[in-house]
């Protein structure tokens, strides 16, 4: 049984880490980008960002003033048990979100969409979002917080099988061009592409591809992995860089996730996880051990399964 | 690579502003206030009295809401500070500039050269862009003190009017000048001329299903 107080205290630590510490995979990717960048203004921007991550860690202050919209992804091993059950867990995550908003401090971004009213704590109707996943083995619980920034860089389009790869590339490039100008998407970014599902699920897949996979990871389907490589290179070939200045770094990495969709359609979404790619992860074990990491490791074989029954032995043998 | 670094007062003289060139990197000293849609609506539409002497106290309007809190004893804690996209405030800016005498509009992403020519230049004002975006921790270090926060009861912390004292706060990039030229449009034109973007599109095709109101001209902007 995992104590609820441990869930809340771990969640508060994660809120703090996500806001302040740039994950190592993104940092390494940006350093590589900075080394190749030759546009004078875009080089200046990347250097300033690298200085900024240092300043944030030294001062323990948020790396960006727009601290995004905090949300939670919770993954449970099949045998995990939480004190007070899932309702208690949700309350603990809401408390941690409110406490950290005041504590770090974060910007209280969340308002009512119509009345623009505000609790000054990032908690409200549907906020923070809490999404769930499950894994076949284990009594642990993974808490993942992501504070994605928000208004630009993401788009959705219903494509059709006849659009083909050429249509997918067009919509991908259009998203980079539209939101890359003036740096609205705060690139270079981790671009997530969602393909398939229904309209809403295509958005979910793309969002998760950008925020729940790390720089350097590849889809387990080798043909999709090859597309990820190709799209990363394509996105970096348009002559644009940070802030929409002349440059060659738009995409730190491109991650693609798919889901089965209607036979007549091919819904697609594009998401940009920005220069402040805020994510933090901890696994809480049944015995009370807490292990912090920055890789959500969300897309396991189980999450991508395509069979009726889950047969790990068969997968392992392949 | 060399960028020119300049220290600038938040109550700059006309000469100071005339010297700024597109792409210069600026660090600010003096009082700066945050104002975005909430403040504009309250001051311009609800006609509330602006709680500062403008522009004598500050001629620098920051399109920002900080990651900050007001402590129980009334003191302030300001962590990171970055800007929000400015194009959304086009509706209010001409009147605001006239009323406030703002000479420095500080934000994210700039405005169009049409905006610059129609009301920035006539008011002797220029646009400074934050960098990144965003260098929230670096800018936070440049906040010497929080002098006041106005209208937080009415507008909430994110939309309130924060008055901060800047001490070499930056970096910012000069994104418009007194000719009304726009740094971002200049860069867009260079990218379009390079031919790289056109080459990247060679292998693509337009969507089977069209959408109303969209452009296929990639020299267009979406703001």
Image (cartoon, grey):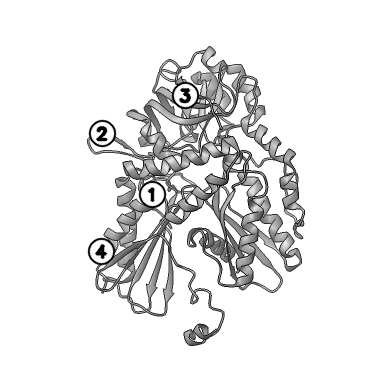
Q: Position of residue B34 (x, y in %)?
A: 44, 30
Picture quadrant of residue A86: bottom left
Q: Residues within 10 Å of mark 2 (few under 14, many from 20)?
A: few
- Mark 1 vs mark 4, foreground winner is 1
Q: Which residue is mark 4?
A: A6
Q: What chain does badge 3 belong to?
A: B
Classify residue A189 as left or right of residue B156: right
Mark 4 closeness class: few <14, some 14–19, many ≥20 residues within 10 Å: some
Which of the two labelled residues, at mark 3 and mark 2, occupies the earlier sequence position? 3
Quarter of the rendering occupied by the N terminus of chain A: bottom left
Q: CA distance from mark 1 to mark 3?
A: 28 Å
In this figure, which residue is indicated by the disc labeled 3? Answer: B60
Callout 3: 10 Å neighbours few (<14), some, many (20+)? many
Is disc 1 placed on a helix, strand or loop? helix
Return the x and y of residue A239 as percentages of the image width and height: 67, 44
Circles 4 and 3 on the same chain: no
Whether the residues at callouts 1 and 4 have beta carbons within 8 Å, the answer is: no
Same chain? Circles 1 and 2: no
Question: In the image, which is nearer the foreground, mark 3 or mark 2?
Answer: 3
Q: Nearer the viewer, residue A146 or A21?
A: A21
């Amino acid at each position: 049984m995992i104590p609820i107080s441990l869930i809340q205290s771990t969640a508060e630590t994660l809120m703090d880490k996500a806001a302040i510490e740039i994950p190592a995979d993104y940092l390494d990717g940006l350093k590589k980008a900075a080394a190749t960048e030759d546009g004078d203004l875009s080089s200046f921007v990347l250097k300033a960002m690298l200085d900024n991550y240092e300043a944030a860690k030294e001062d323990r202050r948020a790396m960006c003033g727009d601290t995004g919209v905090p949300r939670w992804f919770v993954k449970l091993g099949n045998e995990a048990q939480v004190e007070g059950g899932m309702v208690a867990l949700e309350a603990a995550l809401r408390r941690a979100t409110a406490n950290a908003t005041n504590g770090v401090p974060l910007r209280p971004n969340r308002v009512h969409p119509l009345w623009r009213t505000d609790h000054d704590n990032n908690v409200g109707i549907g906020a923070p979002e809490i999404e769930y996943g499950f894994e076949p083995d284990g009594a642990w619980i993974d808490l993942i917080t992501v504070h994605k920034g928000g208004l630009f860089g993401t788009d959705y389009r219903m494509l059709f099988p006849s659009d083909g790869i050429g249509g997918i590339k067009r919509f991908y490039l259009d998203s980079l061009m539209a939101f890359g100008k003036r740096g609205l998407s705060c690139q270079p970014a981790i671009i997530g592409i969602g393909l398939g599902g229904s309209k809403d699920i295509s958005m979910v897949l793309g969002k998760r591809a950008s925020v729940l996979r790390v720089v350097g990871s590849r889809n387990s389907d080798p043909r999709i992995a090859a597309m990820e490589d190709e799209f990363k290179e394509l996105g970096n070939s348009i002559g644009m860089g940070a802030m929409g200045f002349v440059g060659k770094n738009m995409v730190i990495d491109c991650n693609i996730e798919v889901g089965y969709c209607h036979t007549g359609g091919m819904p697609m979404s594009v998401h940009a996880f920005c220069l402040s790619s805020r994510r933090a992860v901890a696994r809480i074990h049944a015995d009370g051990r807490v292990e912090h990491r920055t890789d959500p490791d969300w897309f396991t074989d189980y999450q991508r399964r395509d069979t009726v029954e889950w047969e790990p032995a068969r997968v392992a043998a392949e | 690579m060399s960028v020119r670094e300049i220290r600038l007062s938040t109550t700059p003289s006309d000469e100071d502003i005339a010297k700024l060139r597109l792409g210069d990197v600026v660090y600010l000293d003096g009082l700066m206030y945050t104002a975005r849609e909430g403040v504009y609506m309250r001051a311009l539409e609800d006609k509330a009295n602006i709680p500062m002497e403008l522009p004598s106290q500050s001629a620098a309007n920051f399109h920002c809401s900080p990651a900050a809190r007001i402590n129980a004893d009334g003191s302030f804690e300001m962590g990171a500070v970055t800007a929000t996209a400015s194009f959304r405030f086009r509706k209010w800016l001409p009147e605001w500039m006239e009323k406030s005498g703002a000479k420095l509009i500080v934000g994210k992403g700039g405005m169009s050269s049409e905006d610059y020519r129609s009301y920035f230049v006539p008011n002797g004002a220029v646009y400074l862009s934050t960098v990144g975006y965003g260098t929230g921790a670096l800018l936070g270090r440049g906040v010497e003190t929080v002098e006041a926060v106005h209208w937080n009861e009415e507008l909430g912390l994110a939309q309130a009017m924060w008055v901060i004292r800047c001490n070499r706060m930056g970096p910012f990039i000069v994104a418009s000048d007194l000719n009304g030229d726009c740094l971002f449009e200049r860069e867009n034109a260079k990218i379009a001329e390079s031919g790289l973007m056109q080459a990247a599109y060679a292998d693509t095709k337009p969507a089977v299903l069209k959408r109303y109101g969209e452009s296929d001209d990639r020299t267009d902007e979406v703001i």
